[in-house]
Image (spheres, rainbow, N blue to C red):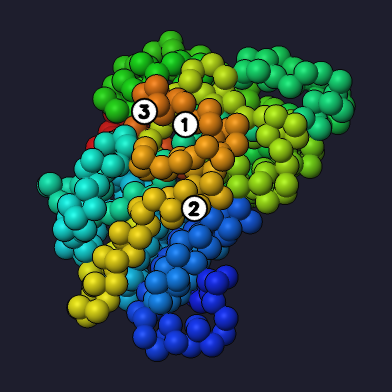
């Protein structure tokens, strides 16, 4: 548990004396998550504030690093008999084995009482929390990965217009280089490199080929010409990111914020970093969902799971927290801070900025795909991320990477 940074995140509405009361009367729940960037910390404080305002206490178990660092810690604590009260995971298949082992609280009664089947939009989000007809998690957002974030400052310095799609981004990259600007910021972690691969795939090969490979696990398509074009495009993108030595995704976002880099392929959570830096969409930066070529987003995202606990007081509080996380006001405040889309369609998101509005209209038009976390097992995802880490940071040829990828798809479960 050494990586778990524990602290009580106190609700802003609470003075020291009322906190004492809350501790005395309320229930303390430790909640683990990997939301440690500036924007993410603001977003998670919305949950903490809402929970503390009920008289209970949010004991913050933020785990520094990415999901890749946090998930093994979370899982080993649950398996090792030291479970937290609630934890973030990406909805989909990540918790499958823990649920099968009977380690996760069944939330079906909470879901039924809250009418989740009627409010969760799109239904795929609730399906991803459901195993054998029982609900085991509460989805809190849709987090899509098919975005490029562009620095206006960088393009202004290079004396060119901000690109309107991926093809223009690639075509104008030499101009940025001439101006001493790195075209593509990239954090050196497999999940980020895999996210970039996924976004480029959808832009270059389109959704049919993507679905065939990622959902239907069709290795022939992964070996075929559409994916040859994808791997070539990713090899080209690798050159545009040479010299990007940062590790964390938010360090790469910062390069876009400061104009040190032209763009970053990153999920919609990047929005939170621009917000913290007080940058204005359309003025300081632009965002292109589907890289401006294919207007689709995936329905991956975050959900909270509640490890089984013997104490009925804790169990009752876990269910109360689950209901709170999906309640209308909490959905609005959390998602506005996070840059993600809410999981319910019946709330007022009119104050969302331009990027979120683009996401909301794609969602309204049904332009959604399942995420890799929803379609592939956690093992397969990790293997693909490892391959992407090797490919992006070395000099493996596009053809070799394609063949190794096709093999992983062939073996995928
Ligand atoms: C994802 C998660 C997002 C964001 C991102 C980077 O797994 O869904 O909410 O936190 O990691 O930290």
Q: Residue 272 versus residue 386: which sits nearer the camera?
A: 272
- In terms of secondary structure, where does tag 1 sit? helix
Point out the tag, 3 or 2, that comes first from the N-terminus: 2
Image position, residue 328 (x, y; %): 39, 50
Dot label at residue 157:
none
Point out the tag, 1 or 3, that comes first from the N-terminus: 1
Q: Nearer the viewer, mark 1 or mark 3?
A: 1
Q: Which residue is farthest top?
A: 225
Kindly tell me whether residue 405 is visible in this rendering.
Answer: no
Q: Residue 316 versus residue 214: which sits nearer the camera?
A: 316
Q: Residues within 10 Å of mark 3 (few under 14, many from 20)?
A: some
Cα distance, mark 3 to mark 2? 23 Å
Q: Which residue is the site of mark 1? A: 360
Cα distance, mark 2 to mark 1? 15 Å
Q: Residue 114 versus residue 104: which sits nearer the camera?
A: 114
Q: Which residue is the site of mark 2? A: 334
Q: Which residue is the site of mark 3? A: 369
Would residue 390 appear left or right of 278 to someone viewing this image?
left
Q: Is residue 271 above or below residue 404?
A: below
Residue located 56% across and 39% down the image: 352
Point out the tag, 2 or 1, that comes first from the N-terminus: 2
Quadrant housing the C terminus: top left
Residue located 30% across and 59% down the image: 323
């Amino acid at each position: 548990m050494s990586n778990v940074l524990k602290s009580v995140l106190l609700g802003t509405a609470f003075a020291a004396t009322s906190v004492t009361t809350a501790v005395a009367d309320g229930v303390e729940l430790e909640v683990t998550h990997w939301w440690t960037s500036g924007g993410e910390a603001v977003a998670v404080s919305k949950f903490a504030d809402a929970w503390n305002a009920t008289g209970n206490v949010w004991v913050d178990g933020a785990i520094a690093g990415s999901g890749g660092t946090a998930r093994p810690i979370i899982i080993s604590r649950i398996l090792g008999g030291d479970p937290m009260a609630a934890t973030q995971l990406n909805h989909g298949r990540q918790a499958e084995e823990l649920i099968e082992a009977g380690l996760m609280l069944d939330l079906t009664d909470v879901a039924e009482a809250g009418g989740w089947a009627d409010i969760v939009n799109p239904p795929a989000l609730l399906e991803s929390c459901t195993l054998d007809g029982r609900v085991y998690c509460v989805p809190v957002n849709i987090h899509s990965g098919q975005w490029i974030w562009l620095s206006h400052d960088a393009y202004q310095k290079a004396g060119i217009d901000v690109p309107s799609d991926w093809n223009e981004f690639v075509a104008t990259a030499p101009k940025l280089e001439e101006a001493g600007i790195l075209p593509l910021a990239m954090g050196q972690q497999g999940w980020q490199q895999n996210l970039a691969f996924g976004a480029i795939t959808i832009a270059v090969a389109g959704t049919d080929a993507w679905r065939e490979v990622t959902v239907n696990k069709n290795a022939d398509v992964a070996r075929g010409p559409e994916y040859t074009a994808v791997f070539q495009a990713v090899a080209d993108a690798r050159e545009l990111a040479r010299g990007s030595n940062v590790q964390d995704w938010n360090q790469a976002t910062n390069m876009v914020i400061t104009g040190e880099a032209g763009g970053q392929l990153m999920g919609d959570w990047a929005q939170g970093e621009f917000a913290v830096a007080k940058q204005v969409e359309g003025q300081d930066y632009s965002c292109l969902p589907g890289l401006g070529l294919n207007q689709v987003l995936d329905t991956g995202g975050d959900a909270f799971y509640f490890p089984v606990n013997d104490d009925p007081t804790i169990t009752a509080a876990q269910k109360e927290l689950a209901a709170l996380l999906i309640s209308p006001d909490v959905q609005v405040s959390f998602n506005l801070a996070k840059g993600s889309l809410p999981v319910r369609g019946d709330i007022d998101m009119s104050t969302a900025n331009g990027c979120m509005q683009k996401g909301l209209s794609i969602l309204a038009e049904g332009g959604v795909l399942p995420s890799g976390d929803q379609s592939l097992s956690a093992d397969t995802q990790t293997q693909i991320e490892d391959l992407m880490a090797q490919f992006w940071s070395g000099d493996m040829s596009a053809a070799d990477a394609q063949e190794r990828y096709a093999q992983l798809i062939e073996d995928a479960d």
